[in-house]
Structures are given as C-alpha cells and as structure tokens.
C-alpha cells in the first residue's frame, strides 16, 4: 500500500514540475516546481536513493532561494 502511494507521489511530482515548465507566471511556475520537488522528495525517500534525495533537497532549496531573491529585489 505504501509503495502505491509513493509511486503516485512520484508521478504527481513529475507531472507538477512538467506543468511548471509551461507556466508563464513566475510565481505560479515557482510554486509548481516547489510542490513537484517535495512530491519527488517523498518518492526518493521511499526509494532510499541517497543521490535522488540530495538532488531533490538541492532543487527545493535552490527554488526557495530564488523565490527569496525575487521577493527581495521587488522591495
């Protein structure tokens, strides 16, 4: 049962990130990347794949950093 949910999270994460590629609005695009990254992180933890886990953490942190940079420049 856990395997099914993990795979669903992985598929949803991949689809969410792919959707983000096609979004024009920067804020919505960044949100799609962040949500998709978290969903793929859950899947990578299920797989216990260290490289994939680190990759997803770096992806999520870089997305958060970029969001803070964009918001800081607007002020």
Image: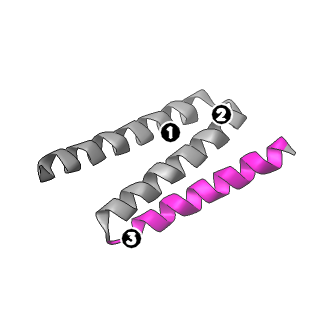
Q: Name the residue under label 1.
A: 56
In this figure, which residue is indicated by the disc labeled 2? Answer: 45
- Quadrant of the image occupied by residue 44: top right
> CA separation, marks 1 and 3?
21 Å
In the picture provided, is 44 more to the left or to the right than 17? right
Quadrant of residue 50 within the rendered picture:
top right
Residue 9 at x, y = what percent? 67, 51
Q: Is residue 2 left or right of residue 30?
A: right
Tell me the crowding category of disc 3: few under 14, some 14 to 19, or many 20 or more residues within 10 angstroms, Cα based.
Answer: few
Q: What stretch is highlighted in magenta?
A: 2-24
Kindly report the distance in space between the C-alpha atoms of the residues bearing marks 1 and 2: 10 Å
- Going from the N terminus, do you reach mark 1 or mark 2 first? 2
Identify the main secondary structure in magenta.
Answer: helix
Nearer-N-terminus badge (2/3): 3
The residue located at (49%, 63%) in the rendering is 18
Q: Are marks 1 and 3 in contact (CB under 8 Å)?
A: no
Q: Mark 3 points at which residue?
A: 23
Q: Which residue is drawn at 59% across and 46% down?
A: 40
- Picture quadrant of residue 29: bottom left
Discs 1, 2 touching: Cβ within 8 Å:
no
**Badge 1 element:** helix
Question: Is residue 74 in the magenta section?
Answer: no
Residue that sits furthest to the right in the current view: 1
Q: Where is residue 26 in the image (x, y as percent from the top left)?
A: 30, 63
Mark 1, other Cα within 10 Å: few <14 / some 14–19 / many ≥20 = many
Between the C-alphas of marks 2 and 3, the distance is: 28 Å
Give residue 18's mark.
Answer: none
Q: Does 10 appear in magenta?
A: yes
Percent across and percent down for residue 63 are 36, 45
Give the residue drawn at x 49%, y 67%: 19
Residue displayed at 82% across by 42% down:
2
Nearest to N terminus: mark 1 or mark 3 = 3
């Amino acid at each position: 049962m856990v395997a099914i949910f993990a795979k669903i999270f992985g598929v949803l994460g991949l689809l969410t990130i792919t959707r983000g590629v096609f979004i024009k609005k920067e804020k919505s695009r960044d949100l799609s990347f962040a949500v998709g990254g978290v969903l793929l992180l859950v899947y990578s933890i299920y797989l216990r794949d260290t490289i994939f886990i680190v990759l997803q953490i770096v992806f999520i942190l870089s997305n958060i950093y970029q969001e803070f940079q964009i918001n800081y420049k607007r002020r």
